[in-house]
Amino acid sequence: MPRIFSRYRSFMCLNYHPMSEYNHKKIEENWRAFWEKNQTFRTENNTSKPKYYILDMFPYPSGAGLHVGHPLGYIASDIVTRYKRLKGFNVLHPMGFDSFGLPAEQYAIQTGQHPAITTEQNIARYIEQLKNIGFSFDWSREVRTSDPKFYKWTQWIFMELFRSWYNKETDQAEPIETLIAKFETNGTSGIQAVSDEDTPRFTADEWKAKPEREQYEITLKYRLTYVADAVVNWCAALGTVLANDEVKDGVSERGGYPVEQKLMRQWMMRITAYADRLLRGLDTVDWSESLKEQQRNWIGKSTGAEVSFQIEQRVEHIKVFTTRLDTIFGVSFMVLAPEHELVAELTTLAQKPDVDAYVTAAKMRSERDRMADAKTVSGVFTGSYCINPFNGERVPIFLADYVLAGYGTGAVMAVPSGDQRDWAFAKHFDLPIIPILDGQKDIDKQADNTKEGRYINSGIIDGLTYQEALPVLVRFLEEQGIGKAKINYRMRDAVFSRQRYWGEPVPVYFKDGLPYLLDEQDLPLQLPPVDKYLPTETGEPPLARAEGWKYKGEFEYELSTMPGWAGSSWYWYRYMDPQNDQEFADQKAIAYWRDVDLYVGGSEHATGHLLYSRFWNKFMKDRGFVPEEEPFKKLVNQGMILGRSNFVYRLNLTVGGTVKADSGLQPTSKIPPVVFVSKTIKEIVEKSSGPQSFTGSADSDRVQQYLDFFENRLSEIKRDFVEKTPGTLNNLYTSSSAFTSAIHVDVNIVDNDVLDIQAFKKSRSDLENVEFITEPDGSYICGVEIEKMSKSKFNVVNPDTIVERYGADTLRLYEMFLGPLTDAKPWNTNGIDGVYRFLKKFWRLFYEEPTETRPGRWLVTDEKPTPAELKVLHKTIRKVAEDIEHLSFNTSVSAFMVCVNELSALKCNKKAVLQDLVVILAPFAPHITEELWAALGNEPGTLSYAEFPVFNPAYLVEDTIEYPVQINGKVRTTLVFSVDTVASDIEKEVLANEVVLKWLEGKTPKKIVVVPKRIVNVVI
RNA sequence: GCCGGGAUGGCGGAAUAGGUAGACGCGCAGGACUUAAAAUCCUGUGAGCAGUAAUGUUCGUGCGGGUUCGAUUCCCGCUCCCGGUACCA
């Protein structure tokens, strides 16, 4: 009766606070429903507010659901989003799904279920999980790359790429018509285009005389997307091309079938046209230096020269690219990739068996293996020679698999005195190592790539330095017509075809062997139904299975689909105007949102997604579809969350006994009991039987206690086993080689490395009757290892259980509290209680702790805050605002903790302080703050668009400073001085200090360093 | 192999211009409340040595050097771990 009364009273007395106890479940459910109903986070495309676009790399919706690694970046971006709203920005913060991909296709192959169905289910689960964490996404803008309404525009961009060429003169992409116009007026003369190597030269008249088909064929060599042969991992047994990921140690991961490198007709993207702009653009974006460095290295711009080596007694040349033209007189052999187009011609009859064997072996090795293997030297002599154009020397031509066909010209001029790999090759094949610079040292032991000194054995550049020699060499090259200065890029054109089902169909059909674009009104070209998601028996992609799938009922479609990165290369524009069916996005919306102000995602996308996106963006800018040269102004990589795997140790027991030959007993018929040993026991038993046993240490009593405990338990188990399974074969032996086996155990039934034994037994039917040898106190301690979070390692932690137990606010704070956003960090929930306690303590500033008989009273008053309270508040305002700007969220969480600790100590319940605190905490913990914001008398739901409190430095002014006083760099005491004390006065007082005098021992200090407002150091 | 990143107490981490190493949280230990437990609150907590204690002192930021009055921070040389390496996304 009294309980009901007081609850009723407290409810009536105040404007709004139905809840005096911090009930995260109720609070969070209420506010999530409120936001959804009121569309709190819906974003408009035109307001007078300044725009701010915060983007998360959208996830691939896998079947395992969202794990705690996913939200890390989303929480960070949501904090910035909510902060920017409080700062008066109109923030675009959308979410969607990169929903084409291999896992769904694998699943479809296994189950026969259409990938669209599983993808749909996975997305539904992701959305539910994301909504549970309280992100302020504008869900009305969600996109999915596998939705035909979306991929219609991916296909449209592909078509625009096909309709474009790259004009080096204007340094941008242009419609193919401008190229044709040039052909019509001047032929190929004066055309500076990025194109295939084998473009024919012709005059305007010749062009006009060509038949239409031939004209079209010529333009195909210029378009930004084109068909060419590219090397792929071909697995004949599976009838398909494999991702590098799916190849392990040269064989397919599934099934272990052989994989060979095979050339295949593929759609390519002429990203190399943009190499230099991709490089230059990096200087204009606010990304981490390491990320930019990775992209620079990937693009790999190198300045050098291309030189042609005439093949002896033949008309053909071998072209090589070198960045060290100055070493040309040191060339003692030539190395070609085994796939080089001239291999067959160069191979002499005598060498043919060796060469054939080598080429076949190289086909079996993946590109990465070939590059990674620097230790073994392998190669084969072709039997042919070429001529060094600088000195006329004969140069033997070898093949070696460390030279890759796709890089540069697929040929390398080898200079063993200057390049370690060439040096090793020369040693192996006993080829000459010619010194070329007097500055080279010890070249009989290793290569020396120095540019120091003057040239020797080097014909026209003998006696010159590097700087002097280079122009001489380039002039010679050009005069003799044997080469030219050239800029080379490591980056290659991107393969755009996938021999897969679950991707965007390419909007192309073939007529008389030539590719043509579909009519634009026929977009989207939808994925046709197929009976199976496998390649055909003849090795064609799955789309070949689609029956009657022909363009206009007549022409063959392209059968490959687009790669995973197609949709993600432009998706951020779709969020600006996601429903538009006339354009990929309305130009007005694009003009307003322009680019992404903050992009958050994993560093594993550094060279894939982020290069392709920049490439497409630049292309779209060239063609006038978008306004900005760079799409992502600022970018941060969140660190990977590693899983903390737990292990149980299964005792390796064998059933034994002496079996007489005539006994008829089957030794294998008895299964030993399954026994799990706790970690400490396992370690002690292992150590005590190992070489370094415990002897005479202080621990020896404890060790003996554990050993006795183990022996007793084991005897018990043996006795039980004998009783339950009578017979002669009933002895149990522990293995001496592998005492136990570590087995992954689901981390969700382990708490602080202590196993929930009951839950473990219940988790699988075969574990019901297992035995445990626990610690003497009855607990079972698990082993620990940090590894990648993955379902197969049973270390995936699902955010749902944490949200259920602690609430989304705690999850959000805890993920941020784990450490710096950009660091990789192991996930463990050991500290989560501390964050939860913090929220409860924060709540206690507003509500008294409830007792058995009555709920907690509302404590907040309208009293004027004291200077001490204002100091705490403003210190926190400054720290949190700074931290958010620097994306240092772990430190702001601890700043909140310090603030609440201090306000609790001051017993501060004043609205003037607490209301500001609610606002600055809101981006981190939106639910609890919405609740308290309303309880403080504000209109529910208005917190998201409130105003971030302004920091007032006046509250933080100090009039004294505590100086640490060091002797020889070690702090020995501290002294307090008023802020305006001059250095000489400080010095005087420091020298009079008794601690300092003690250390001086009567000597005069050598030096006294006084750093104003910082520190004093006395050097003795 | 190549490119990029990282390493600080028992654990996650802090020290944002080279200036008191270990903020904050977890864990642990002791205490208060309780029949008890949970929850909550209070105190202590890098390691060693000396001291009843206050305290003093030495060592200490992966390893080995260097620059500096002073280095977790800057430089040189290593070790180990992680990411990427062109069809995972």
Image (cartoon, coloured by chain):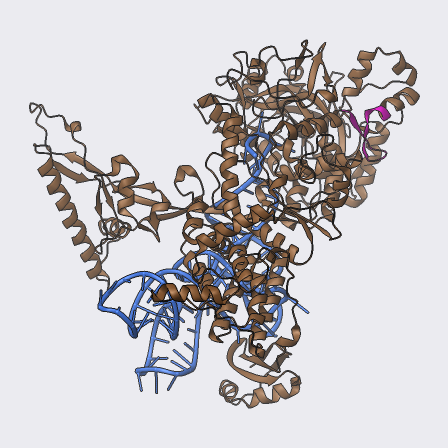
Chain colours: A brown, B blue
Camera-nearest residue between A998 and A934: A934
Residue at image position (27%, 46%) is: A757
Q: Give the x, y percent position of residue A666.
A: 13, 25
Q: Quadrant of the C terminus of chain A?
A: bottom right
Residue A395 vertical placement versus B23 (above, below): above
Q: Is residue A173 on the magenta stretch?
A: yes
Residue A91: x and y in percent read 67, 50
What count of labels does the image hold? 0
Q: Is residue A23 left or right of residue B37?
A: right
Q: In the image, A298: left or right of A930?
A: right
Quadrant (top left/top right/bottom left/bottom right) for the N terminus of chain A = bottom left
Image coords of residue A305 (percent x, y): 76, 34
In reply to whether residue A79 is colored magenta, the answer given is no
In this picture, which residue range is highlighted in magenta? A163-178
Q: Is residue A241 above or below residue A803?
A: above
Give left or right: position of A481 versus A146: right
Q: Is residue A237 visible?
A: yes
Give left or right: position of A1003 versus A5: right
Residue A303 visible: no
For residue A491, what is the image quadrant? top right
Where, by quadrant of the figure, is residue A494 drawn?
top right
- On screen, A844 above or below A353? below
On the image, the x and y values in percent for residue A66 come to: 49, 41
Residue A840, image quadrant: bottom left
Q: Nearer the viewer, residue A886 or B11?
A: A886
